[in-house]
Amino acid sequence: MKIAVRAAMIVALLATLIAHPLPAGASEDAPGTSKHTIPMGDWNRPYLLHVPPQRDDGAPVPLIVALHGGLNDSEYVREQSGLDEVADRHGYAVAYPDGLLGTWNAGACCWFARWAGVDDVAFLDKLIDTLVRQGVADPRRVFVTGFSNGGGMAYRYACERSDRIAGIAVVSGALAIGCTPRKPVSVLAFHGTWDPSVPYTGGGNMDADVHFPFIPVQVLMEFWRWVDKLPALSWPVPDAPDDCVGTGPGPVVVALCTRQRGGHEWPDYASELMARFFADRPSLPKT
């Protein structure tokens, strides 16, 4: 497809979004799940917000921002992850934003968001700021997770906004951008050895027209360990399957759960494990 045709398609689809924005939902304070939008320039960015029922005193709670995979949407990752139920047990709010036409600009990936040059880092900034300002989210307890392309976006946000988050958890995702975080970042990753979309051993192409190979998963974890100045991934992760190994006790942890013969999927234990992983991370310093 020619670049001009791509651009025309994106402009037309953006015009549709501008003309028909999703309606705003209930108050962000209300328990349960509701629809909302955030204005970004000339168009509205939609997101779902889940607030735990035990937030009856109106105090801010820890926030998980959950990013859907490529060509999916917020409702899909909500159902795929089961994070609502986990968040209710552990007292998290969960925001499920939507990428442009089901994609996030994670750097070298993916499709529409990358072609259109969408600033998804700025979108996540504004989403978090909005929920903090409304008293929903504790600014010192913000976490990001994502699946596939959403996982790549979680990595990008950690690279560029390490001072805003207390940790990330990535499922079947790839780092698709140069990364120089300002501070150490705790990272929990889940990956299957038979993943056809993001190969465990690397290789392939990051996008349809980006002929750059995926980084092997274990090399990527070594990168995060090196950036965080941590020991080797040789410690068992508490209360996790045997195929989860990490860098050991400490405020900053890098850990990898490898599912043998697992595919491009969200493991059934992942959401509960990431909730506990996030709970064990220290809050950001007061500003």
Image (tube, rainbow, N blue to C red):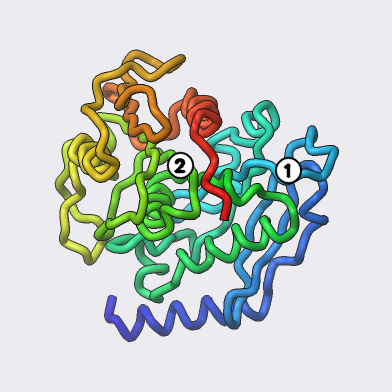
Image position of 164 (left or right of 158): right
Q: Can residue 78 be seen in this view?
A: yes
Q: Residue at x 79, y 33 (%)?
A: 54
Disc 1 + disc 2, Cβ < 8 Å: no
Image quarter of residue 133: bottom right
277 is higher (above) or lower (below) than 69: above
Give the amino acid at mark 2: Gly
How packed mark 1 is, by other alpha carbons closer than 10 Å (few <14, some 14-19, many 20 or more), is many
Image position of 21 (left or right of 241): right
Residue 138 location in percent, x, y?
65, 47
How packed mark 2 is, by other alpha carbons closer than 10 Å (few <14, some 14-19, many 20 or more), is many
**Viewer-nearest residue: 169 or 265:** 169
Position of the N terminus, as image quadrant, is: bottom left
Image quarter of residue 32: top right
Of tags 1 and 2, the one toward the viewer is: 2
Q: Label for residue 167?
A: 2
Residue 198 location in percent, x, y?
27, 44
Q: Residue at x 34, y 26 (%)?
A: 257
- The kind of secondary structure element at disc 2 is strand
Residue beneath label 1, please?
A: 51
Q: Residue at x 58, y 43 (%)?
A: 141
Give the amino acid at mark 1: Val
